Image (cartoon, rainbow, N blue to C red):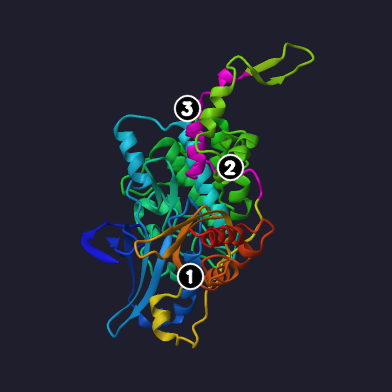
Amino acid sequence: VSVTDVSQGNVPGIESAYLAMDTEEGVEVVWNEVQFSDKKVFKSFEERIREMFENLMQVEHPNIVKFHKYWLDMSESRARVIFITEYMSSGSLKQFLKKTKKNHKTMNVKAWKRWCTQILSALSYLHSCDPPIIHGNLTCDTIFIQHNGLIKIGSVFAEAIHGNVHQHRDEVRNQHFFAPEYGTAGDDYAIDIFSFGICALEMAVLEIQANGDNAVSKEAIDHAGQSLEDPLMREFIQSCVRTEAKTRPTAHDLLFHRVLFEVHSLKLLAAHCFINNQYLLPENCVDEKTKSFDPNGIMAEINHCDRPGIHLKYSHVSPLELDKFLEDVKNGIYPLMNFASQRPHPIPRALSLSQEQMETVKTPTPEPQETETRKVVQIHCNLEANEEAVDILSLFLKMDDRLHRQLSCDVLPSDSPKDLASELVHHAFISEVSTISSDHQASSCLLVAFEQIRAGR
């Protein structure tokens, strides 16, 4: 990572943060530093800090800022943690709300619902991990917005470094985001729910008026809540900021609240199924399919015994709106929250060692190979001879997480499909399941290539 001289400013929860360039991936990232003034304290927390960051690096959620890498740095004069995170270029929720208020605009209710849903989806994921991850630093400054409307939460820190990291609770203007019981031994998901409730309230009213010393009082919060015209929105927020932690709902429960209902569950499920299986469909299938429908044709009807029924025609659905909705689903703006996923989510094994660990762990001989666990769902194969008449086999693999992998190698007449497939498994390019699956996709594709060789290509 190549760090520039440009500081990104006061990143919430971090003492030093810089805009950096990852020269390997060619993307902008954030270089974060957490300083420990007491080396003895650092030593006592070292293992917990390692465990926390290892867990955070495995977190994969569209509404959570990605942790890329971390390492511990301890010298005679200082002790610090350095970690690299995804760069959010469009700014924080706080900045957006300020700009909206300055332009004398109000918050769009649909946007409020979508943002609440995305934040709760991220919190529900963190809280249902095994072990659970408590955010502990959720404010409008630690929530970020991308240009397409996607929300991401950042600055996720466990209690291992809460006492050693500059947090928004230390700032007078942000103390109202933290639950009354914050900092006690019994911290759990309820502190995040309280913080979320204040964020949801600020999103609705744009700003909670503070008194003279910039602190927001409980009376100001109550007044802002009572100013909401929608009784469902008011009840939703008030349930989050109850004084008694045990009476606050969970993030998973809040996702089912009536106020967040915007997209019918069946439509949402259908859209996610479509996106997840899009690789099986032609590229312009939505456009082609909608063109083939008769606009006056009836796609659904609702019958009533005591009154005339309702007919829904294809003309009632705009293809452009459908395309936009599917694009939003693909980008994570409409998470599949109304269907319970398997819980809790186990934290995956660490895929890579930190720089500190790489320096201290001796490399065994021979070096153990990583294994690929993702399945290959689609494979394209191409065989061409280069200028030196050497056959080059190119494989394009689409994995079950929708990531692509492109491979190429020289092929000798003595090579067999089985040997090549085994080599791909050995080097962790494909999983063993992909070579022995019922449809034999990988093996059959390689077999076709070799048959072409035998045919004299």
- 303 in relation to 455, above or below: above
Q: Secondary structure at mark 2?
A: helix
Report the side of 354 relative to 283 (left or right).
left
Q: Earlier in the sequence, mark 1 or mark 3?
A: 3
Confirm or deny contact between disc 2 and disc 3 (CB under 8 A): no
Depth check, mark 2 against mark 1: the one in front is 1
| Mark 1 Cα-neighbour bin, 10 Å: few <14, some 14–19, many ≥20 | few
Rounded to the nearest angstrom, the CA distance separating label 2 from label 1 is 43 Å
Q: What is the x, y in percent for residue 231? A: 56, 31
Q: Amino acid at mark 1?
A: Leu
Which disc is residue 272 wearing? 2
Q: Amino acid at mark 3?
A: Leu
Q: Nearer the viewer, residue 383 or 134?
A: 383
Q: What is the x, y in percent for residue 286? A: 54, 32
- 292 in relation to 240, above or below: above
Rounded to the nearest angstrom, the CA distance separating label 2 from label 3 is 18 Å
On whether residue 364 falls in the magenta region, the answer is no
* Residue extent of the magenta highlight: 313-340
Which disc is residue 412 wearing? 1
Q: Residue at x 50, y 73 (%)?
A: 51
On whether residue 335 falls in the magenta region, the answer is yes
Q: What is the x, y in percent for residue 413? A: 51, 69
Residue 41 visible, this angle: no
